[in-house]
């Protein structure tokens, strides 16, 4: 009976795509143990690979050591390295010792590269060929090695020193006659990246050239690995989430699978820090108490002026963060970006300023308050757009953690500055009349 | 001499990748005319394809009609459709008439699909084979058709009615014996998308399954085209920019290549609309004038409370927008997302509330003001996180334009609500003492 159930399960389950197998598996509770029993480590490796890192950690604890080691041996080295990177050093060493020596060494090499570099995301399972091979020989080679490689669509040509000499696509090979040599069909101009290049640059390169993979070379010019397009997709998605985290000050907690306590722990320091900075705004209002007392109506427009400046600053921040992420800054030039944002801010400021001046005059019948608010908005918006653009750029240049350029920080900065502008304009206009 | 220069130019230029050729071309001014002369329409098609839509429009005007039509004939139908979609209807018709009848019909079909659907981004240049073909026959077929297809790595198997029956990768073919038939190596479980599916879902599917391409079927179940992974990369990048535009209220203007006036025109209506809403905050402050007069110090903390609520709301907004974009909402459930955000907001609120109460007591020696501000922050932050999460979800459910869920809108909403909470708490606590 057990045997029959196993056959039935295997037939149904193995017919699914690994990504779907992973979804089915996650629906199970105690039955998971049965799945480990029914599937070979090689089969389970594909399921395991489709899990998110947190689930991998949880599942890894349920596996027995022998089975687990076999699972890792059957995964691509870069995926094992991603998973191990999430574990404690002690657990990592333990797992590496249990694995096959050769596979473990590949993983160790990848782990040695700094996080978020081409070296850390590349795969070691690529197909390399020699320029002197005939196409027939290459096809034979693929029949044997193909099933283990992550992609066989680009074949990298290396010389005796393992240095990258060219690239040929399967398409090139198929279209050519089978008795010609690789050197006749390969392209010797290969776009490659360095092991230490930032993962975002690698993904942008793949996107720009519409590549399926790009070779990664080490400091001696040897072919060390390849980054495939599916890794590039994941990197771009990850970087987009990071940008959004940066703009909204919720870095690391935009994923709904993070629990509420952890999300609160990640975000609360921000909110509290900004609350401290908010005490400065209280201070600024304090300085201008006498101005406020003479025209009490001024207090009513504080939120509106701060809000408009904050909104404009956040818009410029988005432009700046995005331009850094897509590499558009280098293409368009730093000053052109800043001056475009400043002009945009001023134009929005002029439009808003005129509208609010007219509106307040119609509402309150007082031209002075309209002029004060309108003029303050005009200057504040221009300032806010420059601050929103500049802060992330400066932080990027200083190579500091870009998290401090987040939206709430900009908003707080524009709050303080717009308040200063408002009260300075108000007190000088009121005095001069 | 002219001939010699042409040879030298062609040798240098054609050795570059099309994406790099495009960059070199854009550096030129009057010399562009020479490039058209030196390159065949077929060669220039690859350069043209690498331009951004705005540059394509500009360059298209410089080409003579005959040359231009040849360029479009040599591009993939989906790329021509993308370009034509940016033009006036009259220009579009003119170009389609100049093109080859067959190519033009492919382009017309793609243009008929709604923007941002699988149909609109798919390519018509795919390789379809029959299940009864032998592998040898398929390879022969590829030698002939391969150079025109956008990808040859996935081969789609169709029956007599053009219905999708299976898929085989080049890898499957190479590993198998050449006298076997396609039906023996193909997989008959094919993950496909429908022509009307949203482009974002298609890109997510490709990312989830690590596909190089996915087939697109029409309402009769016929294979209509394929979406390749490089299109998925572009879609994900585009959607990430849109999400960021949504959070920052700068939709459509985060790209630095948009000029300042256009950026201002896109953003100013937002800022002005929000300024109008800001008048409500002025109104709310007006309502509580008597409370404010009795404890003037209350005014100083208005910016801090509004700021904290706005920041918390924006964080929750980022979570919500991101969860919608990545499809995580469906996976985790609507209520779990909302309740997680509410719990997170309350926890941040409690932490911030306690800190500020202590701080204000130490600063001002007045326990009452500390308790009022602390308690208001606690409630405001819980509310703000729910608003930030809920608004984009509701808008998504109502199928309205998500642009109205943008960050500044949420901030203005939380401004008004936190002000109401603050003054209600303040007036009731002050009265009760």
Image (cartoon, coloured by chain):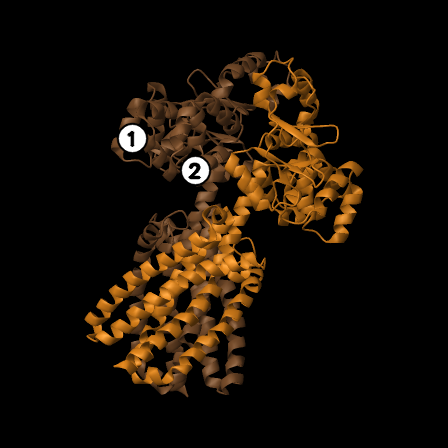
Chain colours: A brown, B orange
**Residue at image coords 51%, 30%:** A213
Residue B284: % across, % down: 43, 78
Question: Label 2 belongs to which residue?
Answer: A26
Task: Check chain identity for marks 1 and 2: say if they share one.
Answer: yes
Q: Nearer the viewer, residue B301 or B222?
A: B222
Estimate the spatial distance between the alpha carbons at disc 1 and disc 2, rounded to whole Å: 24 Å
Looking at the image, can residue B133 be seen?
yes
**If the image is split into quadrants, where does the C terminus of chain A sit?**
bottom left
Quadrant into which the N terminus of chain A falls: top left
Q: For the point 61% across and 11% down, which residue is it?
A: A179
Above or below — where is A326 with respect to A192? Answer: below
Instruction: Please tell me which residue lies in front, A270 or B377.
Output: B377
Q: Is residue B230 left or right of residue B149?
A: left
Look at mark 1 in the image and give the residue it sits on: A92
Q: Which mark is residue B332?
A: none
Residue A117, position as x, y percentages in the image: 39, 36
Judging from the image, mark 1 belongs to the subunit labelled A
Tell me which corner region of the image, top left, top right, bottom left or bottom right, holds residue B159: top right
Nearer the observer, B253 or B410: B410
Q: Quadrant of residue A174?
A: top right
Expressed as whole percent of the image width and height from the top left, the position of residue B112 reads 72, 47
Identify the element where label 2 is drawn: helix
> Badge 2: how crowded within 10 Å, few (<14), some, or many (20+)?
few
Most foreground residue, A389 or B113: B113
Q: Is residue B261 above or below residue B85?
A: below
């Amino acid at each position: 009976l057990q045997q029959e159930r196993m056959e039935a399960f295997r037939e149904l389950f193995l017919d699914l795509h690994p990504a779907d197998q992973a979804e089915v598996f996650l629906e199970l509770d105690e039955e998971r143990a049965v799945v480990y029993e029914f599937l070979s480590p090689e089969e389970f490796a594909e399921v395991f690979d489709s899990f998110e890192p947190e689930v991998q950690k949880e599942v890894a604890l349920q596996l027995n050591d022998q089975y687990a080691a076999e699972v890792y041996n059957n995964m691509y080295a870069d995926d094992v390295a991603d998973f191990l990177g999430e574990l404690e050093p002690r657990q990592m060493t333990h797992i590496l010792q249990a694995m096959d020596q050769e596979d473990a060494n590949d993983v160790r090499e990848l782990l040695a590269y700094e996080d978020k570099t081409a070296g850390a995301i590349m795969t070691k399972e690529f197909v390399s060929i020699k320029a002197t091979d005939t196409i027939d020989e290459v096809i034979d080679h693929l029949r044997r090695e193909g099933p283990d490689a992550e992609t066989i669509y680009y074949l990298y040509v290396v010389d005796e020193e393992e240095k990258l000499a060219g690239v040929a696509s399967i398409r090139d090979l198929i279209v050519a006659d089978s008795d010609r040599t690789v050197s006749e069909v390969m392209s010797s101009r290969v776009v490659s990246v360095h092991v230490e290049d930032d993962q975002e640059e690698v993904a942008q390169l793949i996107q720009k050239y519409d590549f399926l993979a790009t070779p990664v070379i080490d400091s001696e010019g040897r072919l060390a690995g390849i980054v495939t397009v599916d890794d590039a997709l994941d990197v771009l998605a990850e970087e987009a989430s990071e940008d959004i985290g940066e703009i909204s000050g919720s870095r690391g907690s935009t994923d709904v699978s993070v629990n509420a306590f952890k999300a609160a722990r990640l975000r609360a320091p921000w909110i509290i820090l900004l609350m401290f900075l908010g005490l400065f705004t209280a201070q600024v209002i304090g300085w201008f108490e006498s101005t406020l007392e003479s025209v009490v109506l001024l207090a009513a427009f504080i939120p509106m002026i701060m809000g408009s400046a904050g909104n404009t600053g956040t818009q410029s921040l988005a432009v700046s963060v995005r331009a850094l992420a897509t590499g558009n800054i280098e293409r368009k030039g730093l000053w052109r970006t800043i001056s475009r944002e400043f002009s945009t801010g001023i134009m929005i400021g002029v439009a808003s300023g005129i509208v609010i001046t007219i509106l307040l005059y119609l509402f309150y019948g007082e031209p002075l308050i309209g002029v004060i608010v309108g003029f303050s908005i005009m200057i504040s918006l221009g300032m806010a757009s420059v601050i929103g653009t500049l802060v992330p750029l400066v932080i990027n240049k200083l190579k500091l953690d870009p998290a401090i350029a987040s939206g709430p920080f900009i908003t707080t900065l524009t709050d303080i500055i717009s308040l200063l502008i408002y009260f300075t304009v108000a007190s000088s206009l009121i005095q001069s009349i």
